[in-house]
Amino acid sequence: MGGKNRLPMKRLTEIFTDAGGRECKTSIQSGNLLFKAASKKEAASLGLKVSCLLRERERLEIPLIILPANILHKALNDHPFIDEEKDERMVSIGFLSKKPPLDALSRLDPNKSPGDRYQVQGELIFLHTPHGMARSKLTVGYFDRRLGATTTLRNVKTIRALIRLLESYEA
């Protein structure tokens, strides 16, 4: 939750808690919040409640992408470009709100942003932007329009920080 939709993480935590979220933890001002849920259904329901509260209380229309914890590990393990780049900020993962249909993949232009690479696998987009995301034309908006889904991007450094936060649940 950045840019025009700025919301302090403390406030986001309050909204999740008010919606019924348990053991909510945040990772700096990143837009990432971890919580416990008994099932995928409970997590999805919580996401809908939080969206409503964000609209009512903060006047924010923010799409939420709720992911199970194991997807972060899987995404790191499956990333095809991660071993080629020393700077973890130049390697990112896009998490999609739904798996795009096959015909949507043909709408992606492999030459959209010269020097940058991407690979779509199911609900994940693996990116390598050696000159940084700020210079890349492979933006969230581009993927949203072409794939017909909502995308959120996180670099590998942030994902590793989230995994450490997840591990603190178990400690």
Image (tube, rainbow, N blue to C red):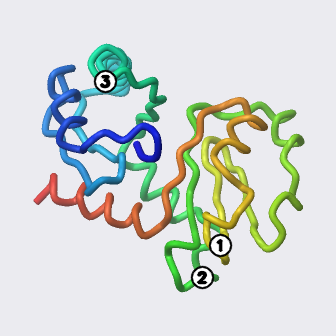
Q: Where does label 2 land, which residue?
A: 85
Could you tell me residue 169's position as x and y percent? Answer: 16, 52
Figure quadrant of residue 45: top left
Q: Are marks 2 and 1 in contact (CB under 8 Å)?
A: yes
11, above or below 26, in the image = above
Camera-near label (3 vs 1) is 3
Whichever of labels 3 and 1 marks the residue nearer the N terminus, that label is 3
**What amino acid is labelled 3 in the image?**
Glu
Whichever of labels 2 and 3 marks the residue nearer the N terminus, that label is 3
State the residue in front, 127 or 99.
127
Helix, strand or loop at disc 3?
Answer: helix
Figure quadrant of residue 86: bottom right
| Residue 169 in the figure: left or right of residue 38 | left
Q: Where does label 3 land, which residue?
A: 58
Q: Residues within 10 Å of mark 3 (few under 14, many from 20)?
A: few
118, above or below 64, in the image = below
> Which quadrant: the C terminus?
bottom left
Q: Residues within 10 Å of mark 1 (few under 14, many from 20)?
A: some
| Residue 88 in the figure: left or right of residue 112 | left
Q: Are marks 3 and 1 in contact (CB under 8 Å)?
A: no
Count up the numbered dots. 3
Residue 44 tag number: none
**What amino acid is labelled 1 in the image?**
Phe
Q: Where does label 1 land, which residue?
A: 81
| Residue 158 in the figure: left or right of residue 134 | left
Helix, strand or loop at disc 1?
Answer: loop
